[in-house]
Every structure is written in structure tokens, then in C-alpha cells.
Amino acid sequence: MSMPLQQQYQTAQLTPCRFCNNVPTAQTKFRGHRGMIIMMQFRHVDGPFCRDCGMATFREMTSKTLIQGWYGYASFVITPFIVLWNIINRGKVASLAPPQPSPYGGARQPMNPGKRLLARPISIIGLCVPFILIFGLILVIALSGDA
């Protein structure tokens, strides 16, 4: 027999964070992408996450994707979707209450979320990469047309 909806919700809220064992948590997945000219690598970290650990994971995975995700043919198209996926899933952990020790014990200090995504220099540089690549491509095409 299945559990009532209220009991399922309470059970999900008491699932401890995978990093610090605090509650409440949200079950989600943050993704990363690394483009390497002719190859690419997909990464992911599965939850459940408390608010602080989830925000830290979101910021780390997304900032690495912004700096490493543009350097392949297909990666140039894939990276914006990975970033959008992470932004959507960020909402699940951002809306959680502050982490509290798990009633099951074993809780540790949550991860430090760090600076906001757009306050990190590596993320700003990563956002500039596609524009620099497009500008460089236009410049090469324009200069080769004169020859």
C-alpha cells in the first residue's frame, strides 16, 4: 500500500543532504559540460542537497561549465542548455529553509556557497568566451575575404 501524500512529503524533507547530512533537502541534479574540440565530457552531481550545499554545487558546476564548455563544435550549442538546466534546478534548493541537523544524527557543517555566480571572475570570463569566439570568427572571415 502506498504512503499518503503528506507522509511522502515529510519523508522527502527528512532525507539528509549527501554532503553534510542536514535537512531539509531537495532531490535534484546539477550538470556540467567540458568541450574539447572533437571530444566532450558530461559531468553531474546527484542530490539530495540542503540549501547551502546545493547552492555551492550549483555555483561550482555552472562556473566550470561557463569557462570550459565552449570549446567544441557541438559544445557551443550544448553549453547554454546545461547552464539553463542548472538555473532551473537551482530554484529547488534556493527555496529551502536554512539547513538544520538531521534527526538521525551525523550532521556536519554545510558547504560554503561562496560568491554569487556572476560575482566570480571565472564566470564573467566564461560568459565572454562565446562572444570572443564569434567575434574572432567574424574577423577571420572578414580578413580572408580581402585577400
Image (spheres, helix red, strand yellow):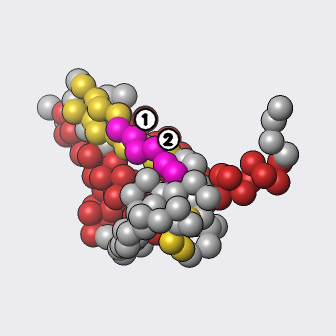
Farthest top residue in view: 38
The answer to whether any part of residue 121 appears in the image is yes
Whether residue 46 appears in magenta in the rendering, the answer is: yes
In the displayed orientation, state which residue is furthest to the front: 104
- Circles 2, 1 touching at the beta carbon (< 8 Å): yes
Q: Is residue 15 magenta?
A: no
| Quadrant containing the C terminus in the rendered view | top left
Q: CA distance from mark 2 to mark 1?
A: 8 Å
Q: Nearer the viewer, residue 59 or 21?
A: 21
Tell me where the magenta segment starts and ends, as one range: 43-51
| 87 up-or-down from 95: above or below | above
Q: Quadrant of residue 10?
A: bottom right
Q: Residues within 10 Å of mark 1 (few under 14, many from 20)?
A: few
Q: Check disc 1 and report the residue beneath it.
A: 77
Mark 2 vs mark 1: in front: 2
Q: Amino acid at mark 2?
A: Phe
Q: Position of residue 106 (x, y in %)?
A: 42, 64
Camera-side residue: 105 or 134? 105
Query: Amino acid type of disc 1?
Result: Val
On the picture, is 94 further left or further right than 117?
right
Graded by Cα atoms within 10 Å as few (under 14), some (14 to 19) or many (20 or more), the crowding at tag 2 reads few
Q: Is residue 44 left or right of residue 69?
A: right
Residue designated by label 2: 81
